[in-house]
Image (tube, rainbow, N blue to C red):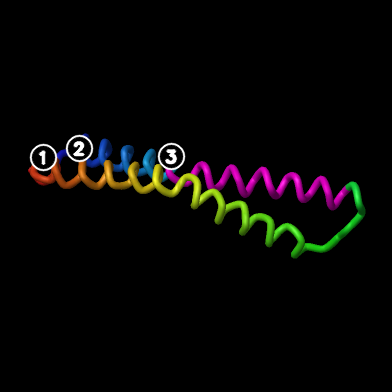
Amino acid sequence: MDQGIVIDLAQNTLWTIIIVSAPMLSLALMVGLIVSIFQTVTSIQEPTLAFIPKILAVFIGILIFGPWMLKTLMDFIINLYTNFNYYLG
């Protein structure tokens, strides 16, 4: 296995991880920001208040983006398995 092949495979793997996790992370970030602004405006200092909305947002995001995430991961795995001989030697 050549060094360039390993670097290319690692780059594709990391890019796939970033692309698949981005919707969930951005949803959690947006909900956390909104809840933090709400807590600041209302002077509510409850640390567990942001936890439930984030979980609900990520769960709804999984329901919405789940098929796309599954297709992206399946395409990556199919590409990995079809080029298995190329990666080995």
Q: Is residue 41 left or right of residue 9?
A: right
Amino acid at pointer 1: Tyr
Above-or-below relation of 47 to 87: below
* Residue 83: quarter of image: top left
Above-or-below relation of 59 to 34: below
**For residue 35: magenta?**
yes
Q: What residue is shown with label 3?
A: 19
For marks 1 and 3, give the CA distance: 24 Å
Q: Are marks 2 and 3 in contact (CB under 8 Å)?
A: no
Amino acid at pointer 3: Ile
For marks 2 and 3, give the CA distance: 21 Å
| Secondary structure mostly seen in the magenta stretch | helix
Q: Secondary structure at mark 2?
A: helix
**Quarter of the image containing the C terminus?**
top left
Task: Work out whether mark 2 precedes mark 3 in sequence or the reverse, and give the earlier one.
Answer: 2
For marks 2 and 1, give the CA distance: 9 Å
Residue at (21, 41) in percent of width and height: 79
Closest to the camera, between mark 2 and mark 3, is 3
The picture places residue 84, in percent across and down from the top left corner, at 13, 45
* Residue 68: quarter of image: top left
**For residue 21: magenta?**
yes
Q: Is residue 53 left or right of residue 6?
A: right
Q: What residue is shown with label 2?
A: 5
Closest to the camera, between mark 1 and mark 3, is 3
Above-or-below relation of 58 to 6: below
Amino acid at pointer 2: Ile
Task: Work out whether mark 2 precedes mark 1 in sequence or the reverse, and give the earlier one.
Answer: 2
The span picked out in magenta is 20-40
Q: What residue is shown with label 1?
A: 86
Residue at (56, 52) in percent of width and height: 60
Q: Are marks 2 and 1 in contact (CB under 8 Å)?
A: yes
Residue at (27, 38) in percent of width and height: 7
